[in-house]
Image (cartoon, rainbow, N blue to C red):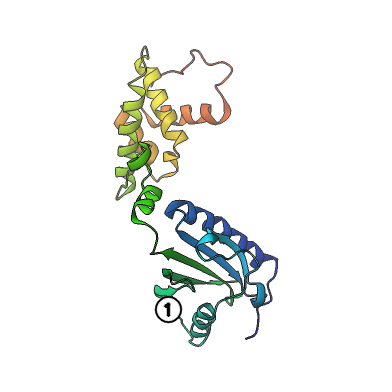
Amino acid sequence: MKTAQLNASDQKTLRAYGRLAEQIGNLLGPFCEVVIHSLENLDASVVKIVNGHNTGRAVGAPITDKALKILNQYQSVAEPEPPLPYYVKHKDATLFRSVTHVIEGENGQPIGLFCINMNLCAPFAELCAALVPGLVTGVSGDSEYFGSNPAEAVSQALRKSRMEVDLEEGLSPKQRNRAIVKKLYEAGIFKLKESIALAAEELGITKHTVYKHLREFKNGPAPDAAEPYGPQL
């Protein structure tokens, strides 16, 4: 098979997928192997591998026959569909449920493969402990709200920020609103559309006040500020 010629942009793309591989491996735990193949050298195609102990592979391992078959099928049609998940059995009889994504370069041609292999022979108790550590250690996770639209996401973030700020004692109404706006700012909520207007309405302040607080968080308070938390409009 003809190998790919990777330019600097293609190499950058593969490195970006490498960071994604780390995240997926961390998310799904030690029984999930994530592999990136570069099509530049099929004899040593593995350029990134996370949790390689599942198959005993390391960087520099060759491409597999299954990966070559998927690549051939992908290149044989004009508009290929994403490959479906499949099952493979390792030489030690370990069963994996796998999926392979074909990575395309800037010219639209395949430059690599992104493979996820889930070890189905992992002990169930160890798999649960890896995915939900709180079941074993008592660790609790951070809360995350899945809003269906920006307004709902802002409202949920406001509710959480209010609860956190209300635990602080001795804050005046002005200081309380400023502290809530700061928490929303630190959480990146104001990147959402209409978030400033929604926050101002919920807090009973003007959009101008929200903008003023945001400027202070970004640049520091104005030198001639009359009071430490700014005027409440």
In the image, residue 182 lies at what x, y percent?
44, 29
In this rendering, the answer to whether 51 lies above or below 209 is below
Looking at the rendered image, the quarter that the C terminus falls into is top left
In the image, residue 201 lies at what x, y percent?
31, 32
Q: Is residue 98 visible?
A: yes
- Residue under circle 1? 81
In this rendering, the answer to whether 59 lies above or below 28 is below
Q: Is residue 141 visible?
A: no
Query: At 48% across and 13% down in the image, what residue appears?
Result: 227
Classed neighbour count for the residue bearing mark 1: other residues with Cα under 10 Å, few (<14), some (14–19), many (≥20): few
Residue 206 image-quadrant placement = top left
Residue 191 image-quadrant placement = top left
Q: 206 or 156, which is in the foreground?
A: 156
How many numbered circles does the render carry?
1
Local SS, label 1: loop
Query: At 45% across and 40% down in the image, what residue appears?
Result: 188
Q: 115 or 190, which is in the foreground?
A: 115
- Furthest toward the bottom, the residue is 76
Residue 205 image-quadrant placement = top left
In this rendering, the answer to whether 139 lies above or below 106 is above
Looking at the rendered image, the quarter that the N terminus falls into is bottom right
Q: 4 or 148, which is in the foreground?
A: 4
In the image, residue 57 lies at what x, y percent?
58, 66
- Amino acid type, mark 1: Glu
In this rendering, the answer to whether 169 lies above or below 162 is above
- Furthest toward the front, the residue is 92
In the image, residue 146 lies at what x, y percent?
32, 47
Give the side of residue 158 with respect to residue 208, left or right. left
